[in-house]
Amino acid sequence: MESSQEIAFQIYYEDTITPLNFSESQTINEFKEFVSLCLECNMADIVLFVESYGRIDSPDILELPLSLIELKPKSQYTYKLFCINTTKIEKLIINDTYCVNKIFSIDKKSLNSPLSQYGLRLKGKENKIICIPCAKICFPDIFCFTPPEQLVKENFICECCKDKDNKCKFDSCEITYTINQEKEELVQDIMKKLKQTLEERNDSRKKEIEKEKLEEIKQKTLLRDFHFEQSIGGDMQLISNYKSPELQKRIKEIVPQRKENSTSKEYVKELLNWYKRKFFTWCNKPKCPLCDSDKDVENIGSVKSDESERKFQAYRTEVYNCKNHEGGLEVRFPRYNAPIKLLDTKTGRCGEWANLFGAILYACGFKTRLVSNYEDHVWNEFYNEEEKRWIHVDSCEEAYDTPLVYEQGWGRVMTFIVASSEEEIVDVTPRYVKDWCVIKERRSEVMENNLKAVIRNWNNNLANKLNEEEKKKLEERRKYENEELGNKTNNCIIKEEEKMPRQSGSLQWRKDRGEI
């Protein structure tokens, strides 16, 4: 293993020049800390620039070794190190009492920084640009007759001291080192290497963090009980409501009629738009019936639903208090599961949205599913006869065929996603994740076998209720879907719409859930 070499520097700081040696194996951050100790100044205040290389303490490279910029050991060369005390200089700049003759920069565009100033173009002197402090002190006659609109607002380097007929009054506080073209190209090459090394380092660290995150998720998942039987049973109870003749009649009276020759895709998109924009509303918290506002309404818990609420399949009721009334006023939000009641309330969260929209799809003649994500969300799928496939729809988001949106846009961690219909139960998780292999790793063998057993029992019972023609069509649909889910790879293209964060719910509600 090669021994670490030392680099020799001369530190130019305010009115002092200080010699310094430092090991090339230590980080740039450690170097900056060492320099600040030597100069007895605040580390956060100073910016470091090395001769021929420019700034070396940019945030992107602080944790990289000093050797990365390929400086020569002290036996071969001594480097000039310019230290700028930003706190002091910024105060001077604010008061127009400091000449920024040279701000070291790899990219000229970055000169527009806290150390940049307005400039004045000297038309009688080869259009040289000087800063306002120099204009005031060195060229007062020109400055006094210059209208503000003629001041230079672009990036520039003050050239006052380069004027052969003038000696800049700010010589004592200038940084006069200038990188010529040849050295600038060298700097660009070094920075390119820095960037490449940094990217490689970041990629490696990202992979480590992702691996640690996946392992943490896996361990937490293994401790959960997903209650597959209970959850699927609840979804099947909701779906059983869809057959109600009264419900179907009421739905057909209010939904947009299907246009002649419109495709299933066109019609379902029209239903999604109508449902979200004109019919159903999102409920962050219920409005006070007297105030007609939720501004002063606060949640105080939830209780078992009363008899009148259970009549419409509400088993849990959220209880709120409106502070706008003396002693408070109780405001209840029953989580109704009966679609016919939701036609009247026209409000809810994802459970109510998907439940009623599933009933609407069913009443409009589509085979429909209720899809439950065991990480707390629910949506629908419908079978598109023209395309011969099941398609994801989320009425909360007015989303059509964007199955990866929860993982890629919302940042959800997926484990189990189950679709339920009146004919079958299907584990559709592969459809909703980019890398199915990663998801399988966090599903234990016990969980897998448990879910398969529950699905098998349900499907056997549901199949007994179908006639031969229905069974044949079901087998055909299942064959194509099994091929689709079985052939899922991590090379699928992510659509732009699937990169969208969650839209439904208040901003604070989405922030609390980490879906923004």
Image (cartoon, helix red, strand yellow):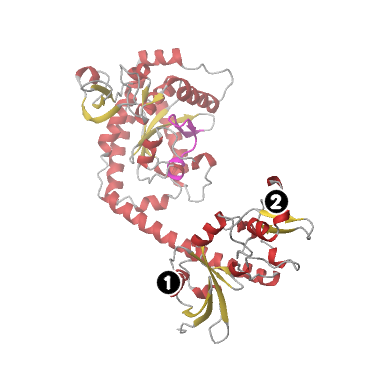
Front residue (pair 441, 339): 339
Q: Which mark is residue 40?
A: 1
Which type of secondary structure does the marked residue at label 1 adopt? loop
The residue sitting at 39% across, 44% down in the picture is 412
Q: Can residue 82 be seen in this view?
A: yes
Q: Viewer-nearest of labels 1 and 2?
A: 2
* 108, above or below 268, in the image: below
Left-right relation of 392 to 295: right
Farthest bottom residue in view: 75
The residue sitting at 40% across, 13% down in the picture is 250
Name the amino acid type tagged 2: Cys
Front residue (pair 214, 479): 214
* 475, above or below 140, in the image: above
Q: Is residue 70 visible?
A: no
Residue 120 in the image: x percent, y percent? 70, 54
Of callouts 1 and 2, the N-terminal one: 1
The residue sitting at 31% across, 38% down in the picture is 455
Name the amino acid type tagged 1: Glu
* 345, above or below 48, in the image: above
Q: Pointer 2: what residue?
A: 144
Which type of secondary structure does the marked residue at label 2 adopt? helix
Q: Quadrant of the N terminus?
A: bottom left
